[in-house]
Amino acid sequence: MKLLTSFVSSGLLLLASSSANSETINDYALWNIKSDPSETRWIQIREFQRVGNEEIFHIDVYSRENGDMQELAMRLADHIAIERDALLNSIGQPVDTGVPERLAYDKAVTRWMKTPAGQREVCRRPVQRCLDPVFAE
C-alpha cells in the first residue's frame, strides 16, 4: 500500500510538472503582431485581470523599422485593454526583446481605470484594428 501511495504521489507530481510546462498566452510577455514587411511590430502584455467571466489583458504596442536598434522603437499605443480571443487572434510568435520603460503605460492604464466601468474601452478585435488610425495598417 505504501508503494502504491508513493507511486500515485510521484505520478501526480509528474502530471503537475508537465502541465506547468504547457505553453499558454501568459508564458511570454512579448509577442509579435502583423506588420508591414519593412517593420516589426510587437505587443507587451503588462497586466491581466478577470472581469466577471471575461479575461482582459492590458498591453502596449511598439514598432521598429527592420534593421533599427531597439532604442529606436516607437510606441504605437500606451495602453490597450483587450479581451483574450482578440489578443489570441492578434499575436504571432513570442519575441525576446521589448521596451522596459513603463511610465507612459502606467499613466494610460491609470486613466483607463479612472474611467467609469461602463465607459471603459475594451478591444474585441485584433490589435491592429484597435490602434489609432494613424498607426493602423
Image (tube, rainbow, N blue to C red):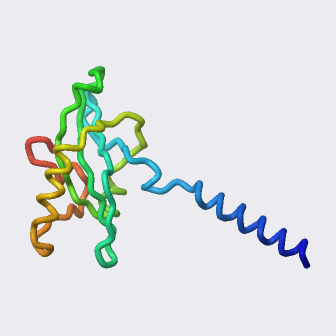
Looking at the picture, how far across and down is residue 3, in whole percent? 90, 71
For residue 84, side relative to residue 1 (left or right): left
Q: Quadrant of the C terminus?
A: top left
Taking depth in this image into account, of 120 and 35 the one nearest to the observer is: 120
Taking depth in this image into account, of 91 and 8 the one nearest to the observer is: 8
Looking at the picture, how far across and down is residue 60, in whole percent? 24, 47
Taking depth in this image into account, of 111 and 18 the one nearest to the observer is: 111
Looking at the picture, how far across and down is residue 115, in whole percent? 10, 67
For residue 26, side relative to residue 58 (left or right): right
For residue 32, side relative to residue 26 (left or right): left
Q: Quadrant of the N terminus?
A: bottom right
In the rendered view, would you say 65 is above or below 4?
above
Quarter of the figure with residue 57: bottom left
Quarter of the figure with residue 136: top left
Residue lying at 14% horizontally and 61% vertically, measured from the top left = 112
Looking at the picture, how far across and down is residue 8, in whole percent? 80, 72
The total number of labels drawn is: 0
Residue lying at 57% horizontally and 56% vertically, measured from the top left = 22
Residue lying at 23% horizontally and 30% vertically, measured from the top left = 73
